[in-house]
Image (spheres, grey):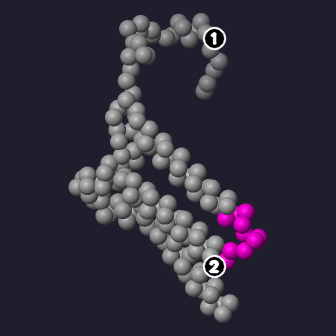
Amino acid sequence: MSMKMTREQTAALATVHPEADSAAVSVVVDRTFHLPPALYFGTVGSYFGFLGLMTIAFGNANLAIPMVIFFFSIIAGFAIPYIWSTMKPDSGQRTIDWGRFMGEGVQTLTGKLTASEAAVQVLTLPVLIFLWGVAALIIGSSVSG
């Protein structure tokens, strides 16, 4: 159960350590996602490829506004995390390059993955969505023909 405590009650129960200085605490921030930018841009490219296929195949004046909204949503969904990951904190963490990624792989919560296994996991959904667009393009062209 919770109960409301006054400031005096909290101060009576608290242990104060004056030697602890909050300014002296160093926090290491790692924003890199431990993946090379090539995988990130491959994902973005697959989503834009799907959007391009849908625009070419089914684009008309009524879909202009939704396509623009989708375009800016993809930009916002990927540009903001990319900018966030490239910020240089004092820890010196940087995104890993392709060679290091190929040599070391990546550590996940379920275990260590080789570079190819990690690439497959990252790119499976975007590539399937792109292929879904190709299938929709083929079906749409065969039905309307």
Overall secondary structure of the magenta stretch? helix
Residue extending farthest to the bottom is: 145
Q: Which residue is mark 1?
A: 6
Q: Residue at x 45, y 9 (%)?
A: 16
Q: Quadrant of residue 101?
A: bottom left
Which contiguous range is marked in magenta? Answer: 57-67
- Where does the C terminus fall, quadrant-wise? bottom right
Q: CA distance from mark 2 to mark 1?
A: 66 Å
* Mark 2 or mark 1, earlier in chain: 1
Q: Position of residue 49 (x, y in %)?
A: 53, 69
Q: In the image, what residue type sits under mark 1? A: Thr
Q: Residue at x 39, y 12 (%)?
A: 20
Q: Is residue 79 left or right of residue 89?
A: right
Q: Is residue 114 left or right of residue 19?
A: left
Q: Which residue is mark 2?
A: 57
Q: Observer-nearest residue: 46 or 111?
A: 46
Q: Quadrant of residue 137?
A: bottom right
Q: Position of residue 127 (x, y in %)?
A: 47, 70
Q: Residue at x 64, y 72 (%)?
A: 55
Q: Position of residue 17 (x, y in %)?
A: 41, 9
Tell me: residue 27, above or below residue 111: above
Is residue 18 visible in the rendered image? The answer is yes
Q: Residue at x 59, y 68 (%)?
A: 51
Whether residue 62 appears in magenta in the rendering, the answer is: yes
